[in-house]
Amino acid sequence: MFKYIADMKFLAGFLKGKCMQCLDSDYRNIVAICSCGAELCRKHAVFHIFEKHTQYPIEIIKENEKMYAQITTNDCFLIEGSLEVLKCKCLAACLIKKESVFPPCMHIFKVFKEMNRVANQISRMTIDYEESECCLCSLRKNRWLCIVCGLVFCGRQRYDMKGNSHAYKHFEGTEHSIFINLDDFDPSHLQMAAFCCYCGVFIIDEIIYEIFNCRYIGVSGCGICPGNSLNKSNKKNCSICSQKSTCMSLLKSPERSSGYALAVLHGISYAILSVGSMCIFNNMKIRDANTEFKNMVNEMLAKMIYMHVFGKNEYIFIDQIEHAINSEFVRYEEDALVDVARFFRNCMSMLKRNERPDCEEKNISNLFYILLRSSITCNVCREKWDRSEKVCILYLKPNQSISEFFSIKQLDKLCKCGAANKTVTSCLANIPSIITIRLKKPGNYILGENATSTIEKELCIPYRESERRSEHAPLYPQRVFENRMDEEENLHDIGSVFISDLLPPDVFEKMKMFFVKNQARSQKRPKSMFQQGRKESFLSYKLKAAVIYQNNPSGGYYFAQMLDERSFLNNHDADIEKVLWTTFIDGKIDQLPLFKDDAILLLYVNADE
Protein backbone atom coordinates (compact mmCIF):
# COMPACT_ATOMS: atom_id res chain seq x y z
CA MET A 1 0.00 0.00 0.00
CA PHE A 2 1.25 3.49 -0.94
CA LYS A 3 -0.01 6.07 1.52
CA TYR A 4 1.29 9.50 2.55
CA ILE A 5 1.99 9.79 6.27
CA ALA A 6 3.85 13.04 7.03
CA ASP A 7 7.12 14.86 6.27
CA MET A 8 7.47 13.16 2.86
CA LYS A 9 7.15 9.73 4.47
CA PHE A 10 5.05 7.08 2.75
CA LEU A 11 3.83 3.65 3.76
CA ALA A 12 5.78 1.41 1.38
CA GLY A 13 5.41 -2.26 2.24
CA PHE A 14 5.93 -3.10 -1.45
CA LEU A 15 9.65 -2.25 -1.25
CA LYS A 16 12.03 -5.17 -0.75
CA GLY A 17 14.41 -3.23 1.46
CA LYS A 18 17.57 -4.74 -0.03
CA CYS A 19 20.03 -3.68 -2.68
CA MET A 20 19.17 -5.15 -6.07
CA GLN A 21 22.85 -5.74 -6.87
CA CYS A 22 24.54 -7.08 -3.72
CA LEU A 23 21.27 -8.39 -2.18
CA ASP A 24 22.21 -6.84 1.16
CA SER A 25 19.12 -7.45 3.31
CA ASP A 26 19.80 -4.55 5.70
CA TYR A 27 17.14 -2.00 4.72
CA ARG A 28 19.04 0.76 6.53
CA ASN A 29 21.75 0.67 3.85
CA ILE A 30 19.34 1.74 1.07
CA VAL A 31 20.08 5.34 0.10
CA ALA A 32 18.41 5.70 -3.31
CA ILE A 33 15.84 4.31 -5.68
CA CYS A 34 16.53 4.53 -9.41
CA SER A 35 14.12 5.39 -12.20
CA CYS A 36 14.59 1.80 -13.42
CA GLY A 37 13.15 0.56 -10.11
CA ALA A 38 16.37 -0.63 -8.48
CA GLU A 39 16.81 -0.12 -4.76
CA LEU A 40 20.49 0.70 -4.21
CA CYS A 41 22.86 0.72 -1.26
CA ARG A 42 25.48 3.43 -0.86
CA LYS A 43 28.18 1.42 -2.66
CA HIS A 44 26.16 0.47 -5.73
CA ALA A 45 24.50 3.87 -5.97
CA VAL A 46 27.97 5.20 -6.84
CA PHE A 47 28.53 2.64 -9.62
CA HIS A 48 24.98 2.73 -10.95
CA ILE A 49 25.52 5.68 -13.29
CA PHE A 50 23.78 5.57 -16.67
CA GLU A 51 22.84 8.31 -19.09
CA LYS A 52 19.07 7.83 -18.95
CA HIS A 53 18.80 6.83 -15.29
CA THR A 54 17.95 9.15 -12.44
CA GLN A 55 18.54 8.31 -8.79
CA TYR A 56 16.11 9.58 -6.18
CA PRO A 57 17.41 9.78 -2.59
CA ILE A 58 15.21 7.94 -0.12
CA GLU A 59 15.52 6.41 3.32
CA ILE A 60 13.75 3.24 4.40
CA ILE A 61 12.40 3.15 7.95
CA LYS A 62 10.67 0.40 9.91
CA GLU A 63 8.18 1.30 12.62
CA ASN A 64 5.82 -1.17 14.29
CA GLU A 65 6.78 -3.88 11.76
CA LYS A 66 5.75 -1.60 8.88
CA MET A 67 8.09 -0.29 6.21
CA TYR A 68 8.14 3.38 5.24
CA ALA A 69 9.95 5.25 2.47
CA GLN A 70 11.01 8.79 3.27
CA ILE A 71 12.13 11.13 0.48
CA THR A 72 15.28 12.91 1.63
CA THR A 73 15.46 15.80 -0.83
CA ASN A 74 13.80 19.18 -1.33
CA ASP A 75 14.28 19.23 -5.11
CA CYS A 76 10.82 19.29 -6.73
CA PHE A 77 12.03 17.39 -9.80
CA LEU A 78 13.49 14.57 -7.69
CA ILE A 79 10.40 14.46 -5.47
CA GLU A 80 8.11 14.12 -8.49
CA GLY A 81 10.29 11.40 -10.02
CA SER A 82 10.54 9.40 -6.80
CA LEU A 83 6.76 9.56 -6.33
CA GLU A 84 6.26 8.25 -9.87
CA VAL A 85 8.60 5.28 -9.27
CA LEU A 86 7.02 4.46 -5.91
CA LYS A 87 3.54 4.65 -7.43
CA CYS A 88 4.43 2.24 -10.27
CA LYS A 89 6.10 -0.21 -7.87
CA CYS A 90 3.02 -0.09 -5.64
CA LEU A 91 0.68 -0.89 -8.56
CA ALA A 92 2.85 -3.83 -9.58
CA ALA A 93 3.05 -5.14 -6.00
CA CYS A 94 -0.74 -5.02 -5.64
CA LEU A 95 -1.17 -7.26 -8.69
CA ILE A 96 1.54 -9.68 -7.56
CA LYS A 97 -0.64 -10.66 -4.61
CA LYS A 98 -3.30 -11.95 -6.99
CA GLU A 99 -3.37 -15.46 -8.46
CA SER A 100 -1.54 -14.41 -11.63
CA VAL A 101 1.62 -16.47 -12.14
CA PHE A 102 3.29 -13.76 -14.26
CA PRO A 103 2.02 -10.42 -12.90
CA PRO A 104 3.02 -7.04 -14.38
CA CYS A 105 6.10 -5.18 -13.20
CA MET A 106 6.50 -1.45 -12.64
CA HIS A 107 7.99 -0.92 -16.12
CA ILE A 108 4.72 -2.02 -17.74
CA PHE A 109 2.85 0.74 -15.93
CA LYS A 110 5.40 3.33 -17.04
CA VAL A 111 4.93 2.26 -20.68
CA PHE A 112 1.14 2.13 -20.26
CA LYS A 113 1.06 5.67 -18.89
CA GLU A 114 3.22 6.98 -21.74
CA MET A 115 1.11 5.20 -24.38
CA ASN A 116 -2.10 6.73 -23.01
CA ARG A 117 -0.50 10.16 -23.03
CA VAL A 118 0.39 10.04 -26.74
CA ALA A 119 -2.49 7.83 -27.94
CA ASN A 120 -4.33 10.71 -29.64
CA GLN A 121 -1.17 12.22 -31.11
CA ILE A 122 0.15 9.27 -33.14
CA SER A 123 -1.35 6.89 -35.68
CA ARG A 124 -1.49 3.14 -35.09
CA MET A 125 1.14 0.98 -36.79
CA THR A 126 0.37 -2.24 -38.68
CA ILE A 127 2.36 -5.30 -37.57
CA ASP A 128 2.38 -8.51 -39.61
CA TYR A 129 3.05 -10.91 -36.78
CA GLU A 130 3.47 -13.94 -39.08
CA GLU A 131 5.67 -12.52 -41.84
CA SER A 132 7.82 -10.09 -39.84
CA GLU A 133 11.50 -10.88 -39.29
CA CYS A 134 14.42 -9.47 -37.34
CA CYS A 135 15.20 -6.05 -38.78
CA LEU A 136 18.96 -6.66 -38.36
CA CYS A 137 19.60 -10.30 -39.30
CA SER A 138 16.30 -11.39 -40.96
CA LEU A 139 15.71 -14.36 -38.65
CA ARG A 140 12.16 -15.72 -39.00
CA LYS A 141 12.08 -17.46 -35.64
CA ASN A 142 12.64 -16.23 -32.09
CA ARG A 143 11.17 -12.82 -33.01
CA TRP A 144 10.43 -10.12 -30.44
CA LEU A 145 8.45 -6.92 -31.01
CA CYS A 146 9.62 -3.82 -29.13
CA ILE A 147 6.37 -2.48 -27.75
CA VAL A 148 7.68 1.11 -27.67
CA CYS A 149 9.09 1.64 -31.16
CA GLY A 150 7.47 -1.22 -33.12
CA LEU A 151 10.70 -2.78 -34.44
CA VAL A 152 11.16 -6.56 -34.54
CA PHE A 153 14.37 -8.14 -33.26
CA CYS A 154 15.63 -11.66 -32.63
CA GLY A 155 16.17 -12.99 -29.11
CA ARG A 156 19.20 -14.74 -27.69
CA GLN A 157 20.16 -18.28 -28.59
CA ARG A 158 18.27 -21.02 -26.82
CA TYR A 159 18.32 -24.79 -26.84
CA ASP A 160 15.76 -25.18 -29.62
CA MET A 161 16.21 -21.98 -31.65
CA LYS A 162 18.84 -19.65 -33.02
CA GLY A 163 19.25 -16.04 -32.00
CA ASN A 164 21.71 -13.15 -32.09
CA SER A 165 20.45 -11.20 -29.02
CA HIS A 166 19.49 -8.18 -31.13
CA ALA A 167 16.47 -7.53 -28.89
CA TYR A 168 18.67 -7.19 -25.82
CA LYS A 169 21.18 -5.03 -27.70
CA HIS A 170 18.27 -2.78 -28.65
CA PHE A 171 17.32 -2.61 -24.96
CA GLU A 172 20.88 -1.65 -24.00
CA GLY A 173 20.92 1.18 -26.53
CA THR A 174 17.43 2.59 -25.99
CA GLU A 175 16.23 1.17 -22.64
CA HIS A 176 13.03 -0.03 -24.33
CA SER A 177 12.52 -2.96 -21.99
CA ILE A 178 9.15 -4.54 -22.95
CA PHE A 179 9.09 -7.06 -25.82
CA ILE A 180 6.26 -9.26 -27.15
CA ASN A 181 7.08 -12.69 -28.56
CA LEU A 182 5.64 -12.94 -32.08
CA ASP A 183 6.22 -16.69 -32.47
CA ASP A 184 3.20 -17.54 -30.30
CA PHE A 185 1.26 -14.33 -30.84
CA ASP A 186 -2.52 -14.00 -31.10
CA PRO A 187 -3.87 -10.40 -31.33
CA SER A 188 -7.33 -11.50 -30.17
CA HIS A 189 -6.06 -13.10 -26.96
CA LEU A 190 -6.63 -10.87 -23.93
CA GLN A 191 -3.91 -12.50 -21.81
CA MET A 192 -0.93 -11.48 -23.94
CA ALA A 193 2.63 -12.41 -22.97
CA ALA A 194 5.56 -10.00 -22.87
CA PHE A 195 9.10 -10.01 -21.48
CA CYS A 196 10.68 -7.27 -19.37
CA CYS A 197 14.44 -6.96 -19.90
CA TYR A 198 14.84 -4.94 -16.71
CA CYS A 199 13.25 -7.54 -14.43
CA GLY A 200 14.17 -10.58 -16.52
CA VAL A 201 10.67 -12.07 -16.20
CA PHE A 202 7.69 -12.87 -18.41
CA ILE A 203 4.45 -10.94 -17.93
CA ILE A 204 1.02 -12.28 -18.86
CA ASP A 205 -1.77 -9.79 -18.29
CA GLU A 206 -4.54 -7.83 -20.02
CA ILE A 207 -2.51 -4.65 -19.72
CA ILE A 208 -0.24 -5.98 -22.51
CA TYR A 209 -3.33 -6.32 -24.71
CA GLU A 210 -4.34 -2.73 -23.92
CA ILE A 211 -0.87 -1.37 -24.72
CA PHE A 212 -0.62 -3.31 -27.98
CA ASN A 213 -4.04 -2.22 -29.27
CA CYS A 214 -3.34 1.37 -28.26
CA ARG A 215 -0.31 1.48 -30.56
CA TYR A 216 -0.57 -1.33 -33.14
CA ILE A 217 -2.86 -3.28 -35.46
CA GLY A 218 -1.98 -6.96 -35.75
CA VAL A 219 -2.43 -8.49 -39.21
CA SER A 220 -1.47 -11.79 -40.81
CA GLY A 221 -2.05 -13.83 -43.94
CA CYS A 222 -1.79 -12.95 -47.59
CA GLY A 223 -3.15 -9.41 -47.33
CA ILE A 224 -5.69 -10.10 -50.09
CA CYS A 225 -8.52 -12.13 -48.60
CA PRO A 226 -11.05 -10.30 -46.36
CA GLY A 227 -10.86 -10.44 -42.61
CA ASN A 228 -7.13 -9.94 -42.76
CA SER A 229 -6.51 -9.38 -39.07
CA LEU A 230 -9.07 -11.14 -36.89
CA ASN A 231 -11.62 -13.19 -38.84
CA LYS A 232 -9.93 -16.58 -38.95
CA SER A 233 -12.88 -18.38 -40.56
CA ASN A 234 -12.23 -16.57 -43.85
CA LYS A 235 -8.57 -17.57 -43.79
CA LYS A 236 -9.40 -21.28 -43.92
CA ASN A 237 -10.71 -20.85 -47.46
CA CYS A 238 -7.50 -19.14 -48.62
CA SER A 239 -4.75 -21.59 -49.65
CA ILE A 240 -1.97 -19.04 -49.06
CA CYS A 241 -3.17 -18.24 -45.53
CA SER A 242 -3.60 -21.93 -44.69
CA GLN A 243 -0.08 -22.73 -45.87
CA LYS A 244 1.42 -19.88 -43.82
CA SER A 245 -0.56 -20.93 -40.76
CA THR A 246 0.82 -24.47 -41.04
CA CYS A 247 4.40 -23.18 -41.32
CA MET A 248 3.99 -20.90 -38.30
CA SER A 249 2.61 -23.75 -36.18
CA LEU A 250 5.77 -25.73 -36.93
CA LEU A 251 7.92 -22.80 -35.80
CA LYS A 252 6.27 -22.59 -32.39
CA SER A 253 8.30 -23.93 -29.49
CA PRO A 254 6.95 -27.19 -28.07
CA GLU A 255 5.55 -27.10 -24.57
CA ARG A 256 7.63 -29.11 -22.12
CA SER A 257 7.51 -29.80 -18.42
CA SER A 258 9.85 -27.89 -16.14
CA GLY A 259 12.06 -30.96 -15.59
CA TYR A 260 13.87 -29.45 -12.59
CA ALA A 261 14.11 -32.75 -10.68
CA LEU A 262 15.45 -34.68 -13.68
CA ALA A 263 18.05 -31.99 -14.41
CA VAL A 264 19.31 -31.91 -10.81
CA LEU A 265 19.51 -35.71 -10.58
CA HIS A 266 21.38 -35.87 -13.90
CA GLY A 267 23.96 -33.45 -12.49
CA ILE A 268 24.26 -35.43 -9.25
CA SER A 269 24.71 -38.76 -11.04
CA TYR A 270 27.38 -37.42 -13.40
CA ALA A 271 29.30 -35.85 -10.51
CA ILE A 272 29.22 -39.18 -8.65
CA LEU A 273 30.45 -40.94 -11.77
CA SER A 274 33.31 -38.42 -12.08
CA VAL A 275 34.36 -39.05 -8.47
CA GLY A 276 34.65 -42.77 -9.22
CA SER A 277 34.35 -44.02 -5.64
CA MET A 278 34.23 -47.82 -5.47
CA CYS A 279 32.42 -47.69 -2.12
CA ILE A 280 29.58 -45.69 -3.66
CA PHE A 281 29.26 -47.95 -6.71
CA ASN A 282 29.29 -51.13 -4.63
CA ASN A 283 26.58 -49.74 -2.37
CA MET A 284 24.13 -49.23 -5.26
CA LYS A 285 21.96 -52.20 -4.36
CA ILE A 286 18.34 -53.02 -3.73
CA ARG A 287 18.30 -54.23 -0.13
CA ASP A 288 15.51 -55.08 2.27
CA ALA A 289 17.41 -53.18 4.96
CA ASN A 290 17.26 -49.99 2.90
CA THR A 291 14.33 -47.63 3.02
CA GLU A 292 12.06 -47.41 0.00
CA PHE A 293 13.45 -43.98 -0.86
CA LYS A 294 17.06 -45.21 -0.70
CA ASN A 295 16.30 -48.12 -3.03
CA MET A 296 14.56 -45.78 -5.49
CA VAL A 297 17.56 -43.43 -5.51
CA ASN A 298 20.02 -46.30 -6.00
CA GLU A 299 18.04 -47.63 -8.96
CA MET A 300 17.67 -44.19 -10.52
CA LEU A 301 21.38 -43.30 -10.12
CA ALA A 302 22.43 -46.64 -11.63
CA LYS A 303 20.27 -45.99 -14.71
CA MET A 304 21.65 -42.48 -15.11
CA ILE A 305 25.26 -43.65 -14.75
CA TYR A 306 24.55 -46.25 -17.44
CA MET A 307 23.23 -43.45 -19.68
CA HIS A 308 26.32 -41.29 -19.10
CA VAL A 309 28.75 -44.14 -19.73
CA PHE A 310 27.17 -45.50 -22.92
CA GLY A 311 25.65 -42.25 -24.19
CA LYS A 312 22.26 -43.92 -24.57
CA ASN A 313 19.03 -42.28 -23.54
CA GLU A 314 16.55 -44.28 -21.50
CA TYR A 315 13.26 -43.34 -19.93
CA ILE A 316 13.68 -42.64 -16.22
CA PHE A 317 10.62 -42.44 -13.99
CA ILE A 318 11.45 -39.96 -11.21
CA ASP A 319 7.95 -38.85 -10.21
CA GLN A 320 8.05 -40.95 -7.05
CA ILE A 321 11.39 -39.50 -5.94
CA GLU A 322 10.27 -35.97 -6.75
CA HIS A 323 7.00 -36.42 -4.85
CA ALA A 324 8.77 -37.99 -1.85
CA ILE A 325 11.17 -35.04 -1.56
CA ASN A 326 8.62 -32.28 -2.15
CA SER A 327 6.06 -33.78 0.24
CA GLU A 328 8.64 -34.07 3.02
CA PHE A 329 9.57 -30.38 3.01
CA VAL A 330 7.23 -27.41 3.23
CA ARG A 331 7.34 -25.21 0.16
CA TYR A 332 7.48 -21.47 0.66
CA GLU A 333 4.21 -19.83 -0.32
CA GLU A 334 5.88 -16.86 -2.01
CA ASP A 335 7.70 -19.09 -4.49
CA ALA A 336 6.10 -18.78 -7.92
CA LEU A 337 8.69 -21.08 -9.47
CA VAL A 338 10.67 -24.02 -8.15
CA ASP A 339 14.13 -23.19 -6.86
CA VAL A 340 16.45 -25.99 -7.98
CA ALA A 341 18.93 -25.10 -5.25
CA ARG A 342 16.26 -25.73 -2.61
CA PHE A 343 15.29 -29.01 -4.30
CA PHE A 344 18.96 -30.06 -4.35
CA ARG A 345 19.30 -29.18 -0.66
CA ASN A 346 16.13 -31.08 0.21
CA CYS A 347 17.34 -34.06 -1.81
CA MET A 348 20.60 -34.18 0.17
CA SER A 349 18.71 -33.88 3.47
CA MET A 350 16.37 -36.69 2.44
CA LEU A 351 19.31 -38.89 1.50
CA LYS A 352 21.01 -38.17 4.81
CA ARG A 353 17.91 -39.32 6.70
CA ASN A 354 17.66 -42.56 4.74
CA GLU A 355 21.33 -43.57 4.78
CA ARG A 356 23.04 -45.65 7.44
CA PRO A 357 25.14 -43.51 9.81
CA ASP A 358 27.58 -46.38 10.44
CA CYS A 359 28.66 -46.50 6.76
CA GLU A 360 29.67 -42.93 6.05
CA GLU A 361 32.17 -43.84 3.33
CA LYS A 362 29.33 -45.50 1.38
CA ASN A 363 26.82 -42.67 1.77
CA ILE A 364 26.15 -40.52 -1.26
CA SER A 365 25.29 -37.42 0.78
CA ASN A 366 28.79 -37.35 2.31
CA LEU A 367 30.25 -36.61 -1.12
CA PHE A 368 28.39 -33.29 -1.23
CA TYR A 369 28.49 -31.94 2.32
CA ILE A 370 30.84 -29.02 2.97
CA LEU A 371 32.17 -27.94 6.36
CA LEU A 372 32.58 -24.19 5.97
CA ARG A 373 34.69 -22.42 8.59
CA SER A 374 34.61 -18.65 9.10
CA SER A 375 37.15 -16.82 11.27
CA ILE A 376 36.02 -13.44 12.63
CA THR A 377 38.73 -11.12 13.96
CA CYS A 378 38.34 -7.71 15.57
CA ASN A 379 40.53 -5.12 13.86
CA VAL A 380 41.32 -3.40 17.19
CA CYS A 381 41.51 -5.87 20.08
CA ARG A 382 42.36 -8.82 17.76
CA GLU A 383 39.87 -11.08 19.53
CA LYS A 384 39.04 -14.05 17.32
CA TRP A 385 35.95 -16.23 16.90
CA ASP A 386 35.60 -19.38 14.80
CA ARG A 387 32.27 -20.41 13.37
CA SER A 388 31.59 -23.63 11.44
CA GLU A 389 28.62 -24.41 9.24
CA LYS A 390 27.74 -27.63 7.44
CA VAL A 391 26.16 -26.99 4.04
CA CYS A 392 25.70 -28.88 0.79
CA ILE A 393 25.63 -25.88 -1.55
CA LEU A 394 27.45 -22.54 -1.82
CA TYR A 395 25.42 -19.48 -2.81
CA LEU A 396 27.27 -16.85 -4.84
CA LYS A 397 25.95 -13.31 -5.03
CA PRO A 398 25.38 -11.69 -8.44
CA ASN A 399 28.65 -11.35 -10.38
CA GLN A 400 30.60 -12.86 -7.46
CA SER A 401 33.41 -15.35 -8.10
CA ILE A 402 34.44 -18.21 -5.83
CA SER A 403 37.67 -16.32 -5.06
CA GLU A 404 35.64 -13.36 -3.79
CA PHE A 405 33.47 -15.72 -1.74
CA PHE A 406 36.54 -16.94 0.19
CA SER A 407 38.34 -13.58 0.26
CA ILE A 408 38.76 -11.31 3.30
CA LYS A 409 35.58 -9.34 3.99
CA GLN A 410 34.60 -6.59 6.40
CA LEU A 411 31.73 -7.23 8.82
CA ASP A 412 29.90 -4.17 10.12
CA LYS A 413 29.24 -5.40 13.64
CA LEU A 414 30.23 -3.86 16.95
CA CYS A 415 32.83 -5.64 19.06
CA LYS A 416 32.94 -5.70 22.87
CA CYS A 417 35.85 -3.27 22.73
CA GLY A 418 33.72 -0.77 20.79
CA ALA A 419 35.31 -1.31 17.36
CA ALA A 420 32.87 -0.88 14.47
CA ASN A 421 34.35 -3.37 12.00
CA LYS A 422 35.54 -6.96 12.02
CA THR A 423 37.42 -9.02 9.45
CA VAL A 424 35.93 -12.29 8.18
CA THR A 425 37.83 -15.02 6.33
CA SER A 426 36.31 -18.29 5.14
CA CYS A 427 37.80 -21.63 4.16
CA LEU A 428 36.94 -25.31 3.93
CA ALA A 429 37.38 -27.42 7.06
CA ASN A 430 36.86 -30.71 5.23
CA ILE A 431 37.63 -32.02 1.75
CA PRO A 432 34.32 -32.63 -0.03
CA SER A 433 34.45 -34.73 -3.17
CA ILE A 434 31.85 -32.56 -4.90
CA ILE A 435 31.10 -28.86 -4.49
CA THR A 436 27.79 -27.48 -5.73
CA ILE A 437 27.46 -23.77 -6.46
CA ARG A 438 24.27 -21.78 -6.96
CA LEU A 439 24.63 -18.76 -9.25
CA LYS A 440 22.34 -15.87 -8.39
CA LYS A 441 21.35 -13.12 -10.77
CA PRO A 442 20.50 -9.55 -9.82
CA GLY A 443 16.92 -8.93 -8.78
CA ASN A 444 16.86 -6.17 -11.39
CA TYR A 445 18.71 -6.50 -14.69
CA ILE A 446 20.57 -3.20 -14.57
CA LEU A 447 22.08 -2.06 -17.87
CA GLY A 448 25.69 -3.13 -18.12
CA GLU A 449 25.56 -5.01 -14.82
CA ASN A 450 23.35 -7.98 -15.62
CA ALA A 451 26.14 -10.22 -16.88
CA THR A 452 26.08 -13.67 -15.39
CA SER A 453 28.65 -14.75 -12.85
CA THR A 454 31.98 -15.88 -14.23
CA ILE A 455 31.97 -19.65 -14.75
CA GLU A 456 35.42 -21.04 -14.04
CA LYS A 457 36.63 -24.38 -15.36
CA GLU A 458 38.80 -24.94 -12.29
CA LEU A 459 38.47 -23.65 -8.74
CA CYS A 460 41.21 -23.11 -6.18
CA ILE A 461 39.69 -23.05 -2.68
CA PRO A 462 41.52 -22.49 0.64
CA TYR A 463 41.44 -25.41 3.04
CA ARG A 464 42.38 -25.59 6.71
CA GLU A 465 42.33 -28.96 8.42
CA SER A 466 39.93 -29.25 11.31
CA GLU A 467 41.57 -29.81 14.69
CA ARG A 468 39.03 -32.53 15.44
CA ARG A 469 40.11 -34.61 12.44
CA SER A 470 41.55 -37.94 13.41
CA GLU A 471 45.26 -38.26 12.78
CA HIS A 472 44.68 -41.46 10.83
CA ALA A 473 41.57 -40.35 8.93
CA PRO A 474 42.02 -40.51 5.15
CA LEU A 475 41.90 -37.20 3.33
CA TYR A 476 40.04 -38.65 0.35
CA PRO A 477 37.54 -41.47 -0.20
CA GLN A 478 38.67 -44.62 -1.93
CA ARG A 479 38.70 -44.02 -5.67
CA VAL A 480 38.19 -46.76 -8.21
CA PHE A 481 40.07 -45.18 -11.13
CA GLU A 482 43.31 -43.23 -10.89
CA ASN A 483 45.76 -42.04 -13.48
CA ARG A 484 48.73 -43.50 -11.60
CA MET A 485 50.65 -46.51 -12.92
CA ASP A 486 50.79 -48.24 -9.51
CA GLU A 487 47.01 -48.80 -9.65
CA GLU A 488 46.92 -50.12 -13.19
CA GLU A 489 46.04 -53.60 -11.98
CA ASN A 490 42.72 -52.33 -10.59
CA LEU A 491 41.66 -51.48 -14.13
CA HIS A 492 42.18 -55.09 -15.25
CA ASP A 493 40.57 -56.72 -12.23
CA ILE A 494 37.59 -54.41 -11.99
CA GLY A 495 35.13 -57.21 -12.73
CA SER A 496 36.21 -59.17 -9.69
CA VAL A 497 35.91 -56.14 -7.42
CA PHE A 498 32.45 -55.17 -8.64
CA ILE A 499 29.60 -56.44 -6.44
CA SER A 500 26.67 -54.12 -7.29
CA ASP A 501 23.47 -55.69 -8.61
CA LEU A 502 22.30 -52.57 -10.49
CA LEU A 503 25.35 -51.78 -12.64
CA PRO A 504 26.47 -54.63 -14.94
CA PRO A 505 30.21 -55.31 -15.35
CA ASP A 506 30.26 -53.92 -18.90
CA VAL A 507 29.48 -50.50 -17.43
CA PHE A 508 32.74 -50.61 -15.48
CA GLU A 509 34.67 -51.75 -18.54
CA LYS A 510 33.30 -48.83 -20.52
CA MET A 511 33.80 -46.51 -17.55
CA LYS A 512 37.59 -46.79 -17.88
CA MET A 513 37.44 -44.41 -20.82
CA PHE A 514 36.15 -41.65 -18.54
CA PHE A 515 39.36 -41.64 -16.53
CA VAL A 516 41.92 -41.43 -19.30
CA LYS A 517 45.36 -40.04 -18.65
CA ASN A 518 45.39 -36.46 -19.87
CA GLN A 519 48.88 -35.39 -20.94
CA ALA A 520 47.83 -31.75 -21.15
CA ARG A 521 46.10 -31.57 -17.77
CA SER A 522 47.30 -29.17 -15.12
CA GLN A 523 49.94 -30.41 -12.72
CA LYS A 524 48.60 -31.93 -9.54
CA ARG A 525 49.57 -30.35 -6.29
CA PRO A 526 52.42 -32.13 -4.50
CA LYS A 527 51.46 -34.66 -1.86
CA SER A 528 53.53 -32.72 0.66
CA MET A 529 50.76 -30.13 0.73
CA PHE A 530 48.41 -32.72 2.23
CA GLN A 531 50.65 -34.32 4.82
CA GLN A 532 49.29 -34.64 8.33
CA GLY A 533 51.67 -32.02 9.67
CA ARG A 534 50.44 -29.39 7.23
CA LYS A 535 47.08 -27.89 8.18
CA GLU A 536 46.64 -25.22 5.50
CA SER A 537 46.59 -25.66 1.74
CA PHE A 538 44.49 -25.10 -1.38
CA LEU A 539 42.15 -27.57 -3.05
CA SER A 540 41.52 -27.83 -6.77
CA TYR A 541 38.09 -28.61 -8.26
CA LYS A 542 37.06 -29.15 -11.88
CA LEU A 543 33.72 -28.28 -13.44
CA LYS A 544 31.75 -31.38 -14.46
CA ALA A 545 28.05 -30.50 -14.78
CA ALA A 546 25.68 -27.55 -15.00
CA VAL A 547 21.92 -27.20 -14.56
CA ILE A 548 20.43 -24.76 -17.06
CA TYR A 549 17.17 -22.81 -16.81
CA GLN A 550 15.55 -21.13 -19.81
CA ASN A 551 12.32 -19.28 -19.13
CA ASN A 552 9.25 -18.92 -21.33
CA PRO A 553 5.58 -17.92 -20.87
CA SER A 554 4.77 -21.50 -19.85
CA GLY A 555 6.99 -21.27 -16.77
CA GLY A 556 10.37 -22.23 -18.18
CA TYR A 557 12.23 -25.54 -18.24
CA TYR A 558 15.42 -27.04 -16.84
CA PHE A 559 17.97 -29.36 -18.37
CA ALA A 560 21.46 -30.63 -17.55
CA GLN A 561 24.75 -30.28 -19.42
CA MET A 562 27.81 -32.45 -18.71
CA LEU A 563 31.44 -31.67 -19.51
CA ASP A 564 33.56 -34.60 -20.66
CA GLU A 565 37.20 -34.19 -19.62
CA ARG A 566 38.26 -35.92 -22.83
CA SER A 567 37.33 -32.70 -24.65
CA PHE A 568 40.56 -31.21 -23.26
CA LEU A 569 42.91 -34.08 -24.15
CA ASN A 570 44.82 -32.07 -26.73
CA ASN A 571 44.28 -28.61 -25.29
CA HIS A 572 43.82 -28.32 -21.56
CA ASP A 573 43.50 -24.52 -21.77
CA ALA A 574 40.51 -24.65 -24.13
CA ASP A 575 37.58 -22.44 -23.17
CA ILE A 576 34.60 -24.31 -21.70
CA GLU A 577 32.34 -22.26 -23.98
CA LYS A 578 34.11 -23.51 -27.12
CA VAL A 579 33.75 -27.23 -26.43
CA LEU A 580 30.55 -29.23 -26.79
CA TRP A 581 28.69 -30.37 -23.68
CA THR A 582 26.56 -33.50 -23.44
CA THR A 583 23.01 -32.15 -23.07
CA PHE A 584 20.02 -34.14 -21.76
CA ILE A 585 16.68 -32.59 -22.72
CA ASP A 586 13.37 -33.63 -24.27
CA GLY A 587 14.30 -37.31 -24.11
CA LYS A 588 17.34 -36.72 -26.33
CA ILE A 589 21.11 -36.50 -25.91
CA ASP A 590 22.75 -33.71 -27.90
CA GLN A 591 26.22 -32.21 -28.12
CA LEU A 592 25.75 -28.46 -27.63
CA PRO A 593 27.81 -25.52 -26.36
CA LEU A 594 27.35 -24.39 -22.77
CA PHE A 595 24.39 -22.05 -22.23
CA LYS A 596 26.46 -19.87 -19.93
CA ASP A 597 23.93 -17.08 -19.49
CA ASP A 598 21.29 -19.55 -18.26
CA ALA A 599 23.42 -21.65 -15.87
CA ILE A 600 22.11 -21.59 -12.30
CA LEU A 601 23.69 -24.67 -10.69
CA LEU A 602 27.31 -25.84 -11.13
CA LEU A 603 28.86 -29.08 -9.85
CA TYR A 604 32.63 -29.33 -9.36
CA VAL A 605 34.59 -32.51 -8.57
CA ASN A 606 37.79 -32.63 -6.52
CA ALA A 607 40.73 -32.79 -8.95
CA ASP A 608 43.36 -33.58 -6.29
CA GLU A 609 41.95 -36.95 -5.28
Image (cartoon, rainbow, N blue to C red):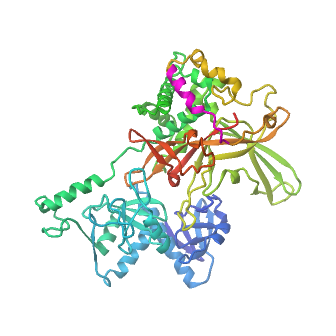
Q: In this view, does 41 lie above or below 424?
A: below
The residue at 53%/63% (across/down) is 444
Quadrant location of the C terminus in the rendered image: top right
Q: Is residue 514 located in the magenta-colored stretch of the structure?
A: yes
Is residue 499 located in the magenta-colored stretch of the structure? Answer: no
Q: Is residue 528 visible?
A: yes
| Vertical arrangement, residue 248 with respect to residue 41, above or below | above
- The answer to whether residue 339 is seen in the rendering is no
- Residue 270: x, y in percent? 54, 35
Residue at the spot 32% in from the left edge and 85% down from the top edge: 121
Name the spot of residue 92 as percent of width and height, x first: 45, 64
- Name the side, left or right, on which 588 lies relative to 422: left
Quick check: 151 above or below 471? below
Among all residues in the image, which is located at the extreme right?
A: 381
Q: In the image, is 93 to the left or to the right of 128?
A: right
Residue located farthest toward the left when viewing the structure as drawn:
237
Q: Where is residue 491 in the image (x, y as percent from the top left)?
A: 61, 22
Q: Which of 459 and 376 is in front in this view?
A: 459
Residue numbers of the magenta segment: 505-521
